[in-house]
Amino acid sequence: MRHLLSIDDLGRDDIELVCDRARSFAEVGRRDIKKVPTLRGRTIVSLFYESSTRTSSSFELAAKRLSADVVSVKAAGSSVDKGESLRDTVATLSAYEPEAMVIRSPEAGAAALVAGWTEAAVINAGDGKHEHPSQALLDVYTLIDNVGTLDGKRIWIVGDVAHSRVARSCIRAFVTMGAEVTVAGPPTLIPRGIDELGSSVSYDFGDLGGADVIYALRMQKERMKEAFVPSLREYAINYQINGRRLGPRQLVMHPGPVNRGVELSPDVIDGPASLITAQVASGLLVRMAILYEILAGSERPRPLTRVGGEGGSSEGAQIGEPA
Ligand code: CP
């Protein structure tokens, strides 16, 4: 991988490679010193023009666990406040000769533009309503961890599909991995043509009971310039995933942050069917894997072998050695 701009750039083999690599990093998190020297001496710039908790913190921690030097810039409080353009900001930060730049922007296509302005590898950490490829990868990883293969699994993505970059990346990733994907919600929140990404469309929850996994989306009030639903209360009455709508063997996912009591009820968020915390934990491993694959990797990972353990030294042992 040169950049990670769109999930479209990845085939099933690529997604499996990232997941295998992420799995090989899980062991690092169980060590006393949770660090490997793989990216020592490399510089990674994290540039966020939109708020973020999960994506920004996990990319930063992932880079640090791989021993990279990290420069984190948030638009608020930076010279962007003084009117500096994205292009000039990228040129400024490129003067440090970073190997990778992680960018989140409210504008669709921003990451692809940045890739044309810098020598660094560019990772799209969310660009407007367009794509959020690292979220889709961590969701595939979380699902494989919890249900095994995605082949034939029925995944319903429900809620505010219209404003969701997560939906666009996840539909493609889940379909590529063999799942049957349905998007569902009120007609005002289901964009025309979304089925062209490979999903079915439903405007009600009549067949929701057939889903193995329900992936709820946040109502993105900040991106709504008009009223898409009469009120959040009415939306919750008709479309909230709660104990009444959730079947006994169904799993629930959400990219976060959640509007508690709107798209998900608190008992479902905190209940046994919820994979939300697992998604956050996967985010760290998968973002380590993305950085590794872009900056250091190319071959399928072998299981980590402890130094001095059976099998002696291996590529896995090499990447797993303490920093
Ligand atoms: N899922 C996600 O992108 O969360 P953040 O906005 O907190 O990064």
Image: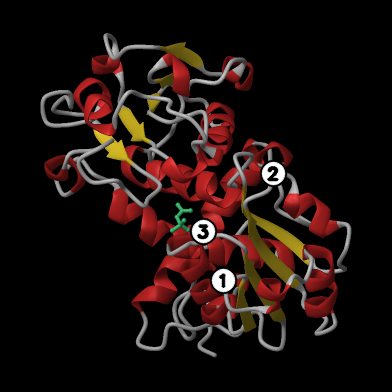
Q: Is residue 299 visible?
A: no
First reached walking from the N terminus: tag 1 or tag 2: 2
Q: Quadrant of the rendered structure where residue 86 is?
A: bottom right
Q: Position of residue 43 (x, y in %)?
A: 71, 81
Quickly name the residue at label 1.
316
Residue at numbered disc 3: 286
> How dense is the environment of label 3, judged by Cα within 10 Å: few (below 14), some, or many (20 and up)?
many
Measure the alpha-carbon separation of dots 1 and 2: 37 Å
Q: Amino acid at mark 3?
A: Val
The answer for how far apart the CA atoms under marks 3 and 1 are is: 16 Å
> Image point 36% across, 34% down: which residue?
215
Is residue 115 left or right of 316 when viewed as pictured? Answer: right
Label 3, label 2: how many angstroms apart (C-alpha)?
23 Å
* Sequence-first disc among 3 and 2: 2
Which circle's residue, 3 or 1, is located before the other in the chain? Answer: 3
Residue receiving disc 2: 108
The kind of secondary structure element at disc 3 is helix
Q: Is residue 58 above or below residue 5?
A: below
Of tags 1 and 2, which is closer to the observer? 2
